[in-house]
Every structure is written in structure tokens, then in C-alpha cells.
Amino acid sequence: MLPFHSLSAAQAALGRNLTYFETLWFNYSHDKSNYFLYCHNILFLFLIFSLIPLPLIFLELFHVSGIHKYKIQPKVRLPSAEIFRCYKDVMRMFFLVVGPLQLVSYPSINMIGIRTGLPLPSGWEIVSQLVVYFMVEDYTNYWVHRFLHCEWGYEKIHRVHHEYTAPIGFAAPYAHWAEVLILGIPSFLGPAMVPGHMITFWLWIALRQIEAIETHSGYDFPWSVTKLIPFYGGADHHDYHHYVGGQSHSNFASVFTYCDYIYGTDKGYRYQKKILKKLKEEAKISEASYYSTAQDVKSD
């Protein structure tokens, strides 16, 4: 809750007029508790997991022409009943684990100093903090993920997430309840190390979940804006991890690829890409040779 009861009081405290976005924030949040603002994450997560995967789910169900070639595992098609079961199981996890966890975790957010007041953070501050959050989460998630692929971690916990060897967007949070709790730690470390504004925290939670959905989408589009992000893994990188399945020891990264490269856990993936590239080149040469021969025969 903001300590100002009017716009004029807020402007007097800041010594300047509020910006447009600060005015919007004041009008919305000045009479709401910090706990209520924090609990917006529950609504955001529900909307993100329900809506963001839908476009690609429609592509999966209706076999839209021209899009199929971008599917990473084109021979695998999940029936609508299986897709709905995945969504239903994720929503059950959301209501029984994720939602209650959000409700009781506010003291930790308050302790590390996530603020809700004015002034709002600048665009540069938001972007720089989000970069830190992604880097910290990615590095720590890499090692937690590797631990979950040891024999005990996989059999007791992580195998649930690997039920989908060709993942879909709804399967991004599909996991054992213990894994949901464990992987919440890397997501919390960044904001704990570099606490910012509640709006930045909202953006972090939203963007991290959208990224996870994109990574599990099963489609690799060449025009995706994420292709412009250095060392970004994306769906193609993580899909190989699910494709190998079982106690896979390749492509553990959640966002970026540098950890897998540095620690040598992407050798299988890079070898596969090399072989596929070679096969495509040989196919092009063979096709070109065929048309050249056919043209020569036609000329004769």
C-alpha cells in the first residue's frame, strides 16, 4: 500500500509530477495491500498457462498447412484427449501446489525488499534486473536439472516431466509436485540477490513462464524474435532433451546454451545437428544431380 493518500501528496513527496505510468500505478495500487499486489502472480500464472500455448495447440490439432514443416518431431501427434489431460493435470498442480505456495511465500518477498511504492523503476533498471534474473535462474537451474537426472532424482521425481518425449506448451509445468517446489528456488534467487519493484517481479514471473512454454512448444520457427538473443536455446535445444528421454545427460539448460557448451553436456545434440546438416546437403546434391541428368536426357 502506498503511503500517499492523493496524487498531490505523492507529487509533493517526489518533488515532481508523476509520469503517466506512475499515475496509473498510483490509481490502481494506493489503496491495496502489498500482499494483495503480490498475489497477482497467481492470476498471471493461470492466464499465461491457459492462453499462451493455445495458438500452437490449435496448430497441433488442426494440422495447419505450411506450419507442419516447423514441427521438431513431425511424426508425433498428440490426440486432443491427451492434450486436455495434460492441461487438467497442470491446473490441478496449480491449485494444489503453485497457488498455495504463492499465498504463503509473501514473507520471503517482503524480507528481501521487493518494493511497491513510487517512483517506478526506469526501463533500463527493469531490463538490467531481468537480465540478472534470467542469468542466475539459468545457471542454478542447470545444476538442479542435472541433479534431477541422477538415478534417484529421475526415478523419484523428474520422470513425470519426461512423460512427454515430444513436449507441447501445456507440458512446460507438467511435473512432480516436488520438482515444482525445487525449481522454484532458482526462480527466486535472482530477485533475492537484486531486489526490485513489484512490477519487475511480475514481469520476471510472466516472462520466465512464457519462455518455458516456448521452449516446450515443439515448434522451431525461423522468424522467432528469440533467435536474436545470444546463446538462447529455444525449443529446438530443449526438445532434444525430451527426445532422448530417460536419464538423458544432454541439454540441461533452461534458457541459454552456454552451460551445456562449457560443461560438455550438449555433445550429443551438436553431433545430431552435424549429421542432419550433412544429410540435408547430400539430399540437395542428389536432387540437383537428378534434375541435371533429367535435363540432359530431355535435351538429347
Image (cartoon, helix red, strand yellow):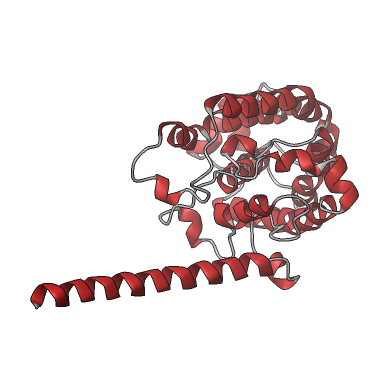
100 or 171, nearer to the observer: 171
- 263 or 250: nearer the eye? 250
**Can you give x and y, in whole percent of width and height, for residue 146 in the image?**
80, 56
Image position, residue 192 (x, y; %): 80, 48
Residue 105 in sight from this viewpoint: yes
Question: Is residue 79 left or right of 196 when viewed as pictured?
Answer: left
Q: Nearer the viewer, residue 188 or 17?
A: 188
Residue at 56% across / 52% down in the picture? 235
Q: Quadrant of the N terminus?
A: top right
The answer to whether residue 174 is left or right of residue 159 is left
Furthest residue to the right?
152
Residue 60 sits above or below residue 143 on the image: above
Q: Position of residue 140 (x, y in %)?
A: 79, 56
Q: Is residue 45 left or right of residue 159?
A: left
Q: Residue at x 73, y 66 (%)?
A: 265
Q: Residue furthest left?
A: 300
**Quarter of the image where one finds residue 85:** top right
